[in-house]
Amino acid sequence: MPKNAHTVANLTDIPAPAGAVRLANWQRIFSLDELHRWFYGTSRDIGYGVSIVIGGHQNSDGSIRERFAYVSVDNSKSDGLDAAALRVLACAAIGAADELDALGNESMRSRSPRTIDQRVARLFRAIA
């Protein structure tokens, strides 16, 4: 094991990221040499089994690897969204974007606009 690798035992004093309400266990997610953990923040439930959740990954030095929002859909409760529900989702997405900006949206600042455009295009193809 590399000398800079951490063990779970010596990471107990790493504080939770700002806005985190739940933390996962430290794991070797991105590299066998380094531990990271998922964190979960605010969840905006719009009804219909749909919510927008702030989350991300924390590095073992306490810094944030990335912070993002994702749409969570419980298919057992959602048959799709009508126009009114889509408007609520859009408002929730704007609120999540504002929260990411306030917390420091590390992941989006490091990605090229082309990569972001490709992800958005894939998202819209998936829901179309």
Image (cartoon, rainbow, N blue to C red):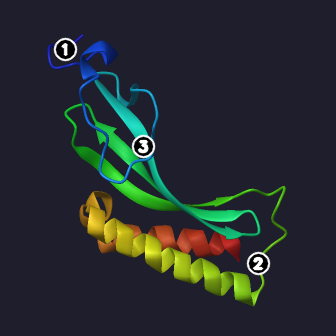
Circles 3 and 2 in contact, beta carbons < 8 Å: no
Amino acid at circle 3? Phe
Indicate left or right for 12 with 29 as reference. left
Amino acid at circle 1? Pro
Under circle 2, the secondary element is: loop
Of discs 1 and 3, which sits in the foreground? 3
Task: Note whether residue 111 is visible.
Answer: no
Q: Which residue is mark 1?
A: 2
Calculate the distance from the C-alpha at mark 2 to the C-alpha at mark 1. 50 Å
Under circle 3, the secondary element is: strand
Does 119 appear above or below 38? Answer: below
Quadrant assignment for the C terminus? bottom right
Under circle 1, the secondary element is: loop
Pick whichever of labels 2 and 1 is earlier in the sequence.
Answer: 1
Judging depth in this view, the residue of 6 and 92 nearest the camera is: 92
Q: Which residue is mark 2?
A: 81
Calculate the distance from the C-alpha at mark 3 to the C-alpha at mark 2. 28 Å
Residue at image location 29% in from the left, 22% down from the top: 12
Residue at image location 74% in from the left, 63% down from the top: 49
